């Protein structure tokens, strides 16, 4: 066996490092038996490991008496290093736990929902102790890339391979700037008026989320001329802004229109129709086990109710 002066620094560290928790426990308890109890092992195991280490190093680490264990000069040096090592690892795992429970949540949201609902409510998330880093993106999130923690999706759900939590069911309702539709006119009459422009969400008309004039009219029992005058936009919030500007009648849905209606920018011009699509919070199965996910889900459900 090599003597200490014949061993490389790497060899010495390799001998001592695995026993850092044992050395630290002995340094704190001043007893092999109490250290063994703290570590959940037998005293004989602790004694055997220390004896093997002393033989490998070529010097004693502890003076043993019937009353207590006292570190030698060499032992004090290594015990101090062991205590620092264990403290460093404890601190690292504390930070990991804090990240798991208190870190920033990276949340992906479609542009329309971000503008019309998330941003107006973001201050309440901060008040609730949630730190949300918002990613505005109209494309589905690839969680395998590790750049996002969760996303709010609008669709029929749930989503295979992902943890999916239903946040809120949705309804669609036609809206326009107050006064755009003359008082007393029914929606069927308005839809038959060639001077009235329909505002369409081009994505909703084709993505299968039932956010379309065809779906609305079918459920509301209204007829719709497929060739009637219409303007199409690629985002739902742009449809609503066009309606606010008096450009026509647009379809609005739950969470996108409540703020504008409350402020008098928009008014319903027809009955609401329930949708098959809904709002879902989706994430990886791993993130769904974290406290951050639980707090995000609770906040979203509270705000959306």
Image (cartoon, helix red, strand yellow):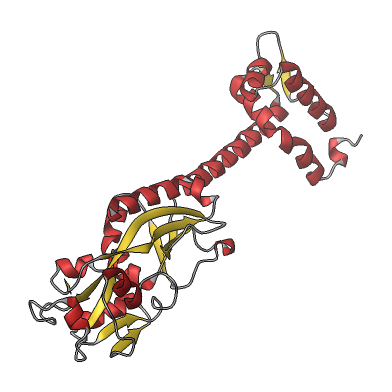
Q: Is residue 269 left or right of residue 305?
A: left
Q: Is residue 141 left or right of residue 238?
A: right
Q: Residue at x 74, y 25 (%)?
A: 61
Residue 256 shows in this picture: no
Q: Residue at x 85, y 39 (%)?
A: 5
Name the residue at the left extreme. 183
Q: Residue at x 13, y 81 (%)?
A: 181
Residue situated in front as seen by the camera: 56 or 239:
239
| Quadrant in the picture for residue 210 | bottom left
Relative to 260, say whether 88 is above or below.
above
Where in the figure is residue 139, as x and y percent of width and height?
48, 72
Where in the figure is residue 254, as x and y percent of width and height?
28, 64
Residue situated in front as seen by the camera: 294 or 185:
185
Residue situated in front as seen by the camera: 40 or 259:
259
Residue situated in front as seen by the camera: 143 or 18:
143
State how many labels appear. 0
Name the residue at the right extreme. 1
Work out which quarter of the rendered image holds the N terminus and state it: top right
| Quadrant in the picture for residue 134 | bottom left
Residue 182 shows in this picture: yes
Relative to 223, say whether 228 is above or below.
below
Where in the figure is residue 98, as x and y percent of width and height?
47, 45
Q: Is residue 86 left or right of residue 271?
A: right
Where in the figure is residue 172, as x and y percent of width and height?
29, 68
Q: Residue at x 38, y 62 (%)?
A: 276
Relative to 250, say whether 167 is above or below.
above
Relative to 240, say whether 165 is above or below.
above
């Amino acid at each position: 066996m090599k003597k200490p002066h014949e061993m490389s620094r790497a060899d010495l560290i390799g001998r001592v490092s695995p026993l850092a928790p044992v050395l630290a426990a002995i340094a704190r308890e001043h007893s092999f038996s109490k250290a063994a109890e703290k570590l959940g092992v037998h005293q004989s195991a602790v004694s055997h490991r220390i004896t093997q280490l002393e033989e490998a190093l070529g010097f004693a680490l502890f003076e043993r008496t019937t009353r207590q264990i006292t570190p030698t000069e060499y032992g004090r040096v290594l015990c101090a290093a062991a205590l620092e090592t264990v403290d460093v690892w404890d601190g690292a795992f504390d930070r990991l736990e804090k990240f798991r429970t208190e870190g920033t949540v990276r949340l992906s949201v479609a542009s329309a929902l971000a503008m019309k609902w998330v941003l107006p409510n973001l201050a309440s998330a901060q008040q609730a102790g949630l730190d949300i880093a918002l990613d505005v993106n109209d494309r589905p999130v690839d969680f395998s890339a590790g750049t996002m923690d969760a996303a709010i999706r609008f669709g029929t759900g749930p989503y295979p391979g992902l943890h999916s939590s239903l946040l809120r069911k949705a309804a669609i309702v036609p809206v326009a700037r107050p006064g755009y539709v003359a008082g007393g006119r029914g929606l069927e009459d308005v839809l038959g008026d060639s001077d009235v422009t329909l505002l369409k969400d081009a994505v909703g008309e084709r993505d299968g989320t039932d956010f379309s004039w065809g779906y609305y009219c079918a459920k509301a029992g209204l007829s719709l001329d497929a060739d009637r005058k219409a303007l199409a936009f690629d985002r739902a919030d742009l449809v609503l802004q066009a309606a606010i500007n008096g450009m026509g009648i647009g379809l609005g849905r739950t969470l996108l229109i409540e703020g504008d209606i409350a402020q008098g920018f928009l008014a319903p011009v027809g009955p609401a129709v329930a949708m098959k699509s809904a709002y879902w919070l989706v994430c990886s199965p791993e993130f769904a086990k974290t406290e951050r996910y639980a707090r995000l889900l609770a906040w979203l459900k509270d705000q959306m109710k």
